[in-house]
Image (spheres, rainbow, N blue to C red):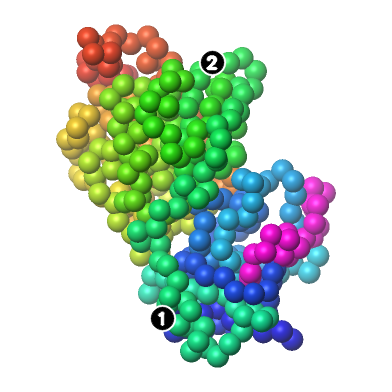
Amino acid sequence: MTTALLVLEDGRVFEGTPYGAEGETFGEMVFNTGMTGYQETLTDPSYHRQIVAMTAPHVGNTGVNLEDPESRKIWVAGYVVREPARIASNWRSHGSLEDYLRGQGVVGIAMPGTRALTRHLRERGAMRAGVFSGPALAPVEELLERVRRSPGMAGADLSGEVSTREPYIVPATGERRFTVAAIDLGIKAMTPQRLAERGCDVHILPGSATAADILALDPDGVFFSNGPGDPATADGPVGALRGVLDAGVPFFGICFGNQIFGRALGLGTYKLRYGHRGVNQPVKDVRTGKVEISAHNHGFAVQAPTDGPFDTPYGPAEVSHVNLNDGCVEGLRLLERPAFSVQYHPEAAAGPHDAAYLFDEFCELMERSRGRTSGADGRPSATTNMEEKGA
């Protein structure tokens, strides 16, 4: 049987069989703990330049379909599974997962050691890796050298590689209530759909959009999406968001957008040891004490005080949500301006629907912003915002 190798940068090697395309691929080795949603995972742009290992023991059972992709292509750099399904069985299926991977040139490996791999990454942290099969196979020492020459994720500026090149619109479903400018840093298709379901015309703009580009749409609200890479490199989106905050336009960000929001507020970001990737992360709403089970895909987080409000150039802010597994920041909120963000994925594609209310909160924020009193500089008044905070 043909051999495939997974080689980690610390020298650990796993052997299996080719799954998908044959050849070689490089990326950051991470794992996803979701039991479902493999097609959404593959097409999530936040996985750009990452090799993803699925912890679910059996992958591919329902095949692939035309409805579930979250973007225009598969973005994962490589794919690792334990036991591929021998047949695809689902009424929506249009083909097998392996054919889907092979058709888009995604190099993968099926191997019995996914549990050992996951434990290794939890102990040692996410690291560079390579998958090799077919003509790419060579002595392990040579393969290891290739892995160590590949780029890491820290310092990687990747959102521009996955963003749309041209603006487009996702129209409101039913009556139009709001106009939203959504900055595509690696947006998933279900996110603007969730806004459209709530009466929003969603104008998707490239990640390179400036504050002037955004404000030219006269939006009721601005949304910054998820996306790949190191937020410390995203100076352009940070500058654009500061212009939006200066203008007082309601803002909502998720995942990478949360990290951009943090940087716009003057906070730092850092790389997590192995990140959060899956559909089962417990997050606590600090205001209510409610715990939500949420979908995540991030390897970086925001540094912010979690013991109470803190000062920013835009007035006081607070950490709104925290992760109950490791205590990291999962949300931010300005107290005197209409702006908030979360680190997780409330669109639930795939994942639980516990956080869907955040889209409703964004719509309520836009509704209230229309009627609030403005100061002489056109920004929402602190008095009105503090009243809202207590409402």
- Residue at 31%, 21% (x, y): give it: 247
Q: Is residue 341 left or right of residue 349?
A: left
State the extent of the magenta-drawn residues as a range: 88-109
Quarter of the image where the C terminus is located: top left
- Residue at 31%, 36% (x, y): give it: 239
Q: Residues within 10 Å of mark 2 (few under 14, many from 20)?
A: some
Q: Is residue 331 left or right of residue 367?
A: left
User: Label 2 near label 1: C-beta < 8 Å?
Assistant: no
Q: Which mark is residue 177?
A: 2
Image quadrant assignment for residue 291: top left
Q: Nearer the viewer, mark 1 or mark 2?
A: 1
Which amino acid, by three-letter code, is at mark 1?
Answer: Asp
- Whether residue 346 is visible, yes or no, is no
Q: Position of residue 154 (x, y in %)?
A: 36, 61
- Residue at 55%, 40% (x, y): give it: 164
Residue 96 among those drawn in magenta: yes
- Residue at 52%, 56% (x, y): give it: 47
Element under disc 1: loop
Residue 27 among those drawn in magenta: no
Q: Which mark is residue 58?
A: none
Q: Is residue 8 above or below residue 385?
A: below
Q: Position of residue 387 (x, y in %)?
A: 27, 16
Q: Position of residue 82 (x, y in %)?
A: 63, 73
Which amino acid, by three-letter code, is at mark 2?
Answer: Arg
Q: Position of residue 177 (x, y in %)?
A: 54, 15
Image quadrant assignment for residue 315: top left
Q: Which mark is residue 10?
A: 1
